[in-house]
Image: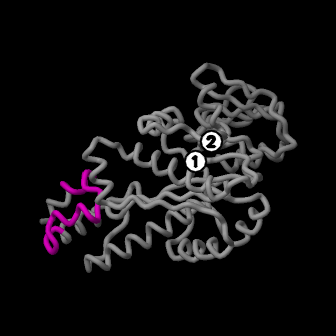
Amino acid sequence: MAQNVFLLSKQKIEAMKQYYHKSLTNVPQGAIFRAKTTNAVITAYKSGKVMFQGSSPQAEAVKWIDDAEIPKNNKPTNKKTSSTSSYTPPSSLFTGSHIGSDEAGTGDYFGPITVACAYVNSSHITTLKQLGVKDSKNLTDETISKLAKEIVKLNIPYSLLVLHNNKYNTLQKRGWSQGKMKAMLHHAAISNLLQKVGNQSLDGILIDQFCEPHVYKKHIGSENHTLHEKTYFMTKAESYSIAVATGSIIARASFVKEMDKLSEELGIPLKKGASKLVDQTIARVIKEKGEPVLQKCAKVHFANTNKAKAYL
């Protein structure tokens, strides 16, 4: 289990306690609070020491740690953690020139998977933030589409790949997991962008983590590819990296555009996600267009395909 320890002010610790109020757990002796998130367990002591422990402690630490605050201890406790933590981005990456990669459409029954990565020079970070670029999950589809157009106007280098449903279903039948598809899409998009970026300053590459780094390496390795140098992984990376947020917006805008195209082609408004409304929409598609058409507009191996039969 990875571990980061920092000395923080009483004011910051109090702010942390309020921030994590919904995640608080039993307080150990000598501590002010303890909170548990999906990334780490955060324990703040009366001495001012704050410990971040877990699978991705840096994901929580970057919310609170300034460059001036030097970690007292950042040593992994076992070999497995050492391997994993080597792919944790340094906090300096978020203010440096870097590539960020993210995807959209992976949990949606209808529509393709889109993957986009963007290269953001450190000089563009403030401009993008002022534009409103942030975690796309907190933005409406309309806002995302507008932001994507503004990003293009800024000439931010990016690479976008779309895995259409026909190809997706073919790969799935060949035994490819969705995880492998995503890994190969990210790798290909990053490779394309690296060629565009050329010799420009690059402090690293950050991928919004959807699987463990060693699994990602295994996926691309099975197709005779290797991980690019200075590649890092981080869950919810779009909340910390403006480059990942930029890639996320481009990917989401593309997904929305592709969904609109499919809806227009079918003459049926396709629902996003994988809810009961989606099941009902599937049934309508089958009734009006025939089940084979799903190969062109859906991820047919999802359980929704069978669930929809209840509405036929």
For the magenta stretch, what is the residue range?
286-306
Q: Are marks 2 and 1 in contact (CB under 8 Å)?
A: yes
| Prevailing secondary structure class for the magenta stretch in the rendered image | helix
The answer to whether 54 is drawn above or below residue 178 in the figure is: above
- Which image quarter holds the N terminus? top right
Q: Residue at x 82, y 39 (%)?
A: 8
Viewer-nearest residue: 35 or 70: 70
Label 2, residues with CA under 10 Å away: few <14, some 14-19, many ≥20: some
Residue ID at (56%, 50%): 191
Q: Residue 26, position in %: x, y?
A: 61, 32
In this view, the residue in front, 181 or 90, is 181
Q: Which residue is mark 1?
A: 207
Q: Which mark is residue 234?
A: none
Rendered image: mark on residue 231: 2
Tell me the mark number nearer the camera, choosing from 2 and 1: 2
Say which element carries label 1. Answer: strand
User: Dividing the image into 4 quarters, which one contains the C terminus?
Assistant: bottom left
Instruction: Identify the residue at image location x=68%, y=27%.
Output: 28
**Residue 120 placed where, x, y %?**
69, 59
Give left or right: position of 162 versus 269. Answer: right
* Residue 225 placement, left or right of 57: left
Compared with 145, 200 (above or below) is: above
Q: For the point 67% across and 24% down, which residue is it?
A: 76
- Give residue 166's quadrant in the image: bottom left
Q: Residues within 10 Å of mark 1 (few under 14, many from 20)?
A: many
In the image, residue 254 lies at what x, y percent?
47, 68
Alpha-carbon span between mark 2 and mark 1: 8 Å
